[in-house]
Image (tube, coloured by chain):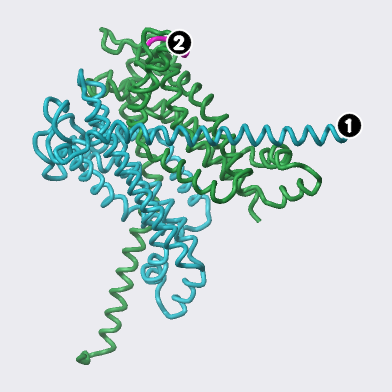
Amino acid sequence: MRTPPSDGARRLGRTTTRRAAEAVVRAIIHVCGWLAIVILAAIAIFLAWNSVRAFGEAGLGTMLSGTAWYPTSDPGKFGMLPLILGSLFVTGVALAVSVPVGVAAAVFISEFSGPGVKDVMKSIIEFMAAVPSVVYGLIGVAVVIPLVKDVFALNSGMTALTGGIVLGVMSLPTVISISEDALHAVPFDLRQGSAALGNTRWQTTFKVTVPAAGSGIFAAVMLGLGRAIGETMAVLMLTGNAAVMPTTVLESVRTMTGTIAAEMGEVVQGGLHYSVLFAVGLVLFAITFTINLAADLVLERQRKRWRR
Amino acid sequence: MSGMSRTRRARRSEAVARAVTGLAAVSVVSVALFVLAYIVYHGIGAIDWTFLTDVPRDRGREGGILPVIVGTLWVVATTAGLTLPIGILAGIYLSEYAPRTFTTRAIRLAITNMAGVPSIVYGLFGLAAFVLLAGFGRSIIASALTLTCMTLPVVITATEEALRQIPQDLRQASLALGATRLRTIYKVVLPAAAPGIITGSILGLARAAGETAPILFTGAVFQMRKLPDGLSSRFMSLPYHIYAQVTSVPGWSPTLVWGTALVLVAGVSVVSVVAALWRSAQRRRVKW
């Protein structure tokens, strides 16, 4: 190695350069850290901005309370109630499937199974969560639509029930894994204390563990609900997409997500219908945002409670 | 007398509870296995060399899915190139720099909330922000940016969790040797946390590969004669291809569509399983 002419000066130079480089990298790290807030705010702003025309011309109150969705008639009718009810019907069925099965399965995994069974169950749930929604939709088309049609002797198997069943299966991984986490977080002392008082495994689970994990399980249900209400592709392929006010789950319904997906491809950009679809997106965003926020606050409180 | 019947009742409810919850678990497993078996059984017949290397013919009723596979790889690779640097840096911020304040709590809240935003809403955002306002048009880059927004929470959370598991001693030892904070992160903390970060990111990207709703209006097309030739090109994609065949091609070929689904599910789950196995192997190797 050749000795540099002025060692001191060069050292100083290198340190200064390195300091400057570090400052730049640190700045980039800070920007990336804040990006999540920026993106979330940008989503809200873009949705709101593109909905302005819909609010002005169709009116938020009229849209939210209108029962007729005829976007292509002249003048178009943009009553969102059939879509909101459609989403609620499908989501209701989905929760009726995923909550009892999911919570019971989580209790089994957490309280009644050994480590080997637990690992197998966890990888299976991981697989279920990794299957794309369009593939669940395809399986629904091949299996659940004919099944619903035959069992209820309908003309068409494309109903809210069909979409809800598939959606329930799709939200199982969310409900199971978050419920299981909540049960797992309950301190072991509590179970031992209960066992020492002479309670059986199930009495402990039912009277001590599940109540202690209650808020976490509630959050799991909320997040499953959020996932079901926001799911698009499977319901689009399975519910038949008739935008009328539903009365039973054995009718065809059109959800908010399905409406956006089906109609956005055919609208004039910047037109009223386009803007109304963004307004539907904004309503959807507001609903899921509220649900997620509530679930997150509940989970945070639970975390604080068991923290030592 | 009464005590004995109470014991018996407790035993019976114990057995019933185990049976009921066990039944729920078994039914979840059977549904998962049914899904897997159904896809493999119906799709395996389509998989041959022609299917993987030919272009779709007769609107997808015949031929293969080469441009569909290539298009998916383009979008996922672009998404990875965007998500990984941003997500890892954001994870570093949260684990190493963020003060324990209200704003940090707000960032965490934003991240968990981003993970819950419906995919179709990301599609609307991508259309408004990247396709129209940024002027990218319907393209690979617009779709990849949209998917990046969706995948970021997964990568950020994975990075933060992996970094938090690295013991504080390691950082302090490096700092004691005179390394700066940034150098400590780069040379000591990140390499130690790499398995967790990589696995989490791969799981997130595998999910992105299967998403349809975000690419619906941002660049996916039904048919393309040639392969994508750049980031501004439109693209075909496995999940969109399945959806488009089922909903807009009368007389769609079940064999080819199930074959496409098998390629998608196999790709996504093989990558996820390998990543998960690799992580647990690494974990066993390193003990803190």
For the point 33% across and 45% down, which residue is it? B206
The chain ID associated with circle 2 is A
Tell me: residue B155, above or below residue A151.
below
Question: Where does label 1 land, which residue?
Answer: B2
Q: Is residue A247 magenta?
A: yes
Q: Secondary structure at mark 2?
A: loop
Q: Three-letter amino acid code at disc 1?
A: Ser
> Can the viewer see residue A236?
no
Question: What letter labels the chain drawn in cyan?
Answer: B
Q: Position of residue B208 (x, y in %)?
A: 32, 42
Q: Is residue A193 left or right of residue B35?
A: right
| Picture quadrant where residue B221 is located | top left
Q: Position of residue A21 (x, y in %)?
A: 30, 68
Q: Three-letter amino acid code at disc 2?
A: Phe
Front residue of A149 and B249: A149
Badge 1 crowding class, 10 Å Cα cut-off, few under 14, some 14 to 19, many 20 or more, is few
The chain ID associated with circle 1 is B
Question: Where does label 2 land, which residue?
Answer: A152
For the point 72% across and 41% down, which residue is it? A204
- Which quadrant: the N terminus of chain B? top right
Magenta highlight: main SS: loop
Q: CA distance from mark 2 to mark 1?
A: 48 Å
Which residues are drawn in magenta? Answer: A244-249
Identify the disc placed on residue B45.
none
| Picture quadrant where residue A279 is located | top left
Q: Nearer the viewer, mark 2 or mark 1?
A: 1
Question: Which residue reaches farthest left?
Answer: B225
Badge 2 crowding class, 10 Å Cα cut-off, few under 14, some 14 to 19, many 20 or more, is few
Q: Colour of chain A?
A: green
Q: Secondary structure at mark 1?
A: helix
Q: Is residue A58 magenta?
A: no
